[in-house]
Amino acid sequence: KVKAKATAEPKYKVKAKPKESKPPASFKVCVCGGCGGIGQPLAMLMAMDRNVGELCIYDLNISPMPPAGVAQDLVHLERKCTVKGYIGEVGQPPVKFMEEALTGCNLVLIPAGLPRKPGQTRDDLFKVNADIAKGIVEACAKYCPEAVLAMIVNPVNSIVPAMAELYKKKGLDPMKIIGVTTLDVVRANKFVGEETGKNPNFISVPVIGGHAGTTILPLFSQDKAGKLLPAEKVPDMDKHVQDAGTDVVNAKNGKGSATLSMAYAGARFGSAILSGLSGRKRTECAYCASTVTDIPYFAQKVVLGPKGIEKVLPLGELNEHETKRLAEVKEQLKGEVETGLKYAEANS
Ligand code: NAD
Ligand code: LMR
C-alpha cells in the first residue's frame, strides 16, 4: 500500500476568521406621535434596529390608540430593546411624561402632526403643526438637548427652519434639527427601477431642495441607472417624484397621507442616524441649515457621524434640466423658509 504523502500544506484551506463586527450600540429613541399612521409602523421598524436599546412611544390622550398599548404590543418582538409608552394630555404642558420619555434620548423621531387631505397643500398644515412641533422641540431642548431631532411633520420646508432657529435662540445646535426627506429618495429610486428594469435596492438618486412640490428635485443624472433615462422622459419622472405624496393623499381619499412608505423611509433615516452616532458614518439626503446654495435651509446629501450631521455635501454636477429646475426650487423654497423664520421670530 502506498501511503499518502504528508505535505506541509493543510488539506483544507483554513477560512480566514471573519472580521470582528462592532457590537451594536444601545441608544434611546423616542417616537413622538408614536400611535399615529406613521408612528406605529415607524416604532415597529425602530424596535427592530440593533442599535436601539430603549424605545419610547409618546402620544396624546386623543390618539385612537394608547401609547401603552402600542408599547405592550411591540415589547413582544424578539429584540433586545425595551419599549415603554408615555401619554400626554391635550392642552396640558406634557411635562411629567415627556421628561421621562425624552431624558437621555439620542434620537427623537417626530411624526406628530396633522396629515393633508385631498385639495390641501402641505403649507396649509403650517400653523397647527408648527405649534405641535414647537411643544415637542421645546421639551427636547429641556430634556435631551444633545439628541438628534428628525422632523417628519409637514410642512418640512418651513417647520425645520422655524425649529432650528428656536434651537439657535436657546444657544443649542440648530444642526440637530433635521428634516426627513428620505421618502423622496425612496420614491425616486423605485420609479427609476420601474423604468429601467434595474433593482431599486442598488439605485441611489440624490433628491435635493425641499419636501414639497416644485422644491423636490431628483438628480437622476447622478445615479448610474438614473442617467440611463432617455432625456425626453426626465421631466415626467421628475414630476412623478414631486407629485407622489399627493397621489397617496388622493388615493387615501381623505383618510390621510403616506404612512407605511414614510415609516419605511423614516426608519431608514433613523437607522442611518444611529449608525452614524455609533461611529459607522452614513450618507443620506436630508433638509437642514445649509450653505451649499444661497437658501439658508436646503436638502442635499449629508454625512451622518457621531454627533449627527457631520458634513453637508455639495450638490455635485447638475445637467441642463437640473440646473433649470434648481432655479425654480430656490424661487419656491425661499418663501417657505421665510415662513419658518418669521414663526421663530414671533414665537420665541
Ligand atoms: P396621524 O394623524 O395618523 O398621526 C399623527 C399622530 O400625532 C397622532 O397619533 C396624534 O395623536 C399625534 N399628535 C398630535 N399632536 C401631538 C403632540 N402634541 N404630541 C404628541 N403627539 C401628537 O398622521 P400621520 O399620517 O402619521 O402624519 C404625521 C405627519 O407626518 C403629518 O404632518 C404628515 O404630513 C407628515 N408626513 C411627512 C412625510 C415626510 O416625507 N416628511 C411623509 C408623510 C407624512
Ligand atoms: C408625502 O410626501 O407623502 C408627505 O409629505 C405627505 C403629503 O402630504 O404628501
Image (cartoon, grey):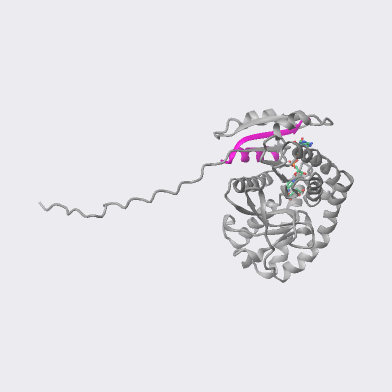
**Closest to the observer, 12 or 142:** 142
Image: magenta residue range:
38-61
Ligand 1 shows up in which quadrant of the image? top right
In the drawing, does residue 56 fall left or right of residue 93? left
Q: Residue at x 82, y 31 (%)?
A: 93
Q: Quadrant of residue 42?
A: top right
Q: Is residue 136 above or below residue 317?
A: above
In the drawing, does residue 13 fall left or right of residue 153? left
Residue 337, percent across and down? Answer: 82, 54
For residue 44: magenta? Answer: yes
Residue 89, percent across and down? Answer: 80, 29
Q: Residue at x 67, y 34 (%)?
A: 56
Q: Quadrant of residue 234?
A: bottom right
How many numbered marks have been drawn onto this rendered protein structure? 0
Residue 332 in view, yes or no? yes
In the drawing, does residue 87 fall left or right of residue 224? right
Residue 65 in view, yes or no? no
Residue 5, percent across and down? Answer: 17, 54
Assign the C terminus to one quadrant of the image. top right
**Closest to the observer, 15 or 278:** 278
Residue 194, percent across and down? Answer: 62, 58
For residue 218: magenta? Answer: no
Q: Residue at x 70, y 42 (%)?
A: 146
Q: Residue at x 67, y 36 (%)?
A: 104
Judged from this view, the residue extending furthest toward the front is: 171
Judged from this view, the residue extending furthest toward the bottom is: 320
Q: Is residue 231 above or below residue 19?
A: below
Judged from this view, the residue extending furthest toward the left is: 1
Q: Quadrant of residue 145?
A: top right
